[in-house]
Structures are given as C-alpha cells and as structure tokens.
Image (cartoon, coloured by chain):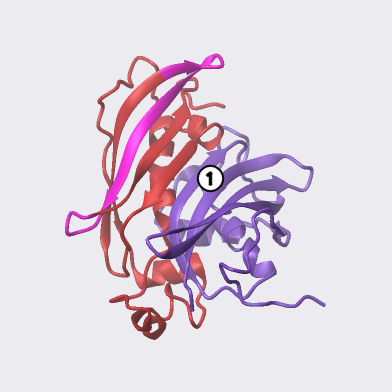
Amino acid sequence: MPTTTADTVTAGQTLPALVKEVTQRKIDTYSGVRPRSIHTDEAWAKARGFRAPLAQAMMSTAYVSEMMTRLLGAGFVKGGAISLAFIKPVYAGDRLTVHGIVTDKRAEDGVTRVVVEVWCENQDGDKTALGTASGVLTAPSGSP
Amino acid sequence: MATFPTLTYEGLRVGEQFVSDEHLVTPEDIEAYAFAVDDHHPWFFEDSPFGGPIAHPTLLGNQALFMRHTRYVVRGGLHARMEFQFLEPIRPGLRVRSRGTVVDKYERRGKPYMVTEFTTEAEDGTVLVRGRFVQMLFRD
C-alpha cells in the first residue's frame, strides 16, 4: 500500500512508469463487442479509415488512475481527479507506457493536494494522451 | 415507447439532458474491468481502507459516456477529452445512475464536437463521480 507522505513526495519526482499491452480481448471486455463499432469490429474500423480497431480512449484514464492510486492510495480514490486529452488513437496490439511527473504539492482545504503531469506513449514513442491528475495525501496507512 | 433518431450535430441541442439506466455494481463488473485494464489492485477484491472492496475509480465512465444511447442511435465518434473528479469510492452492491447535460457544441477544423457534463450517483443521491467529456461526432 502507498506510504506517500508530504515529506516523501516532491515536485519534479518521476513516478514509476506503467506498461500496458492493449490487446483486442481487453478492448472487447472494456467496450463490449458490437457490430459497427470502431473498437470491436475490425472491418468497420478499417472502413472508417483506421488501420485496426481502436482502444476506447477512456482506457487510458484507467491507466492513469492506477498510477495515481499507487502513489496516493485512498487519497486518489476519494478526492482524486483526472483531466486527459486524447491526441492520437491507440490501436489493438499497441503497447502503451504511462508516465507521470509530480509538478505541484499545495495546501487545499486543510489537506495537501499532489498534482502530476501525466502522458501515455505508444511503442513508437508517440504521445497518445496527455494531461494532469491529482489527489490528496492521507495518513501513511492509506486510510481515508 | 421511446424512439431513437440518429444523433446528428445539427439536431443536438445545448441544454439537452440525458439519464442512464440504473446499474447494480457487481463483483463481476469489477473483475471484468480489472482484466480489461490489467489492474488487479487488492482493494478491488479484498478489504480496502474504506471497509470492504471497492471498484476502480473509473469503472463507471462508460455509463456516463453511453447516456446518449438512451435516446439516440449513435454512429460513433472519437473521444477528445475526459475529466473526472472522484468524490466517493464506488462499492459493489451500489445501484448507480449517471445524469448529464450537453453544455456546448462547436465545430473545429470542420469537425463537430459535443461537450457533456455529468454526475454519477448512488441511489441515495450520494455523488460518486463528477466529470465532463468532449466527443467528436462522425458525420455519417
């Protein structure tokens, strides 16, 4: 469980990267298999001009959520936030790496909010999503 | 009986409101989501600091995203931006519903976009998640 405290998190800190293999089966589970879906119908996706089915962009918010829960525990589950722009498609078969750098640590309504710049890159080094995420520091046990 | 016209940018009205169906959050939902996003944190299956298991904070994003499908046939589009605020943990056993309002629509580089603000609530009215999303609509 996270033991992040106001003393151990610092602006400029790089978070451990997450690597995600985005398989068609995971996309199917996330989105539900439907005809005429760019996520789960390969022929339909190609007819729309995409080289393969696309992962739902929102899957990347889940990856950021995982990174932030590892950092802040309960202080992300209750009190966390994500703001993410999706700038390139993520395709079935892509490998995404999720990055985060702490950019701010500030007092807010009696707690300390930690702000992280986040982005996802595919296997070619192209950014697919970028934005910020934040959460609050809780007791070292992670209790809310 | 509901009718389901195809969603078009021209027909979409700013101020239009959507309400999802109610959904019971089950352990199976959480297990499937854990597989889909490859995140098997023990809090999702065992005890958590909130007392009992919880769900991934983003679990109900699709309930919000699919609200418009309760009124329209949606030919698809691309998700441009997502904002979440996680206010309370999502727990298995909760019955949840999302409500949203179209707060803006605009065209940029010839492509149509819609902006929706939403809340996801438990049946007792507790707001679990608040957010906003921007979607580009396919024209055909």
Q: Which chain is red?
A: A
Q: Residue at x 44, y 32 (%)?
A: A134
Image colour assigned to chain B: purple
Q: Quadrant of the N terminus of chain B?
A: bottom right
Q: Which residue is mark 1?
A: B57
Where residue A88 appears, as percent x and y from the top left, is 31, 59
User: Could you say which is closer to the camera, residue A36 or residue B71?
Assistant: B71
Residue A87: percent from the left, percent from the top? 33, 55
Considering only vertical position in the picture, is B85 above or below B37?
Answer: above
Give the residues in magenta. A106-126
* Amino acid type of the residue that numbered disc 1 sits on in the rendered structure: Pro
Measuring from the top left, give residue A119's x and y in whole percent: 30, 45
Q: Residues within 10 Å of mark 1 (few under 14, many from 20)?
A: many
The total number of labels drawn is 1
Compared with residue B27, is residue A11 higher up or lower down, i.e. above or below? above
Residue furthest to the right in view is B1
Q: Main secondary structure of the magenta part?
A: strand
Residue B19 locus on image (x, y percent): 72, 58
Q: Secondary structure at mark 1?
A: loop
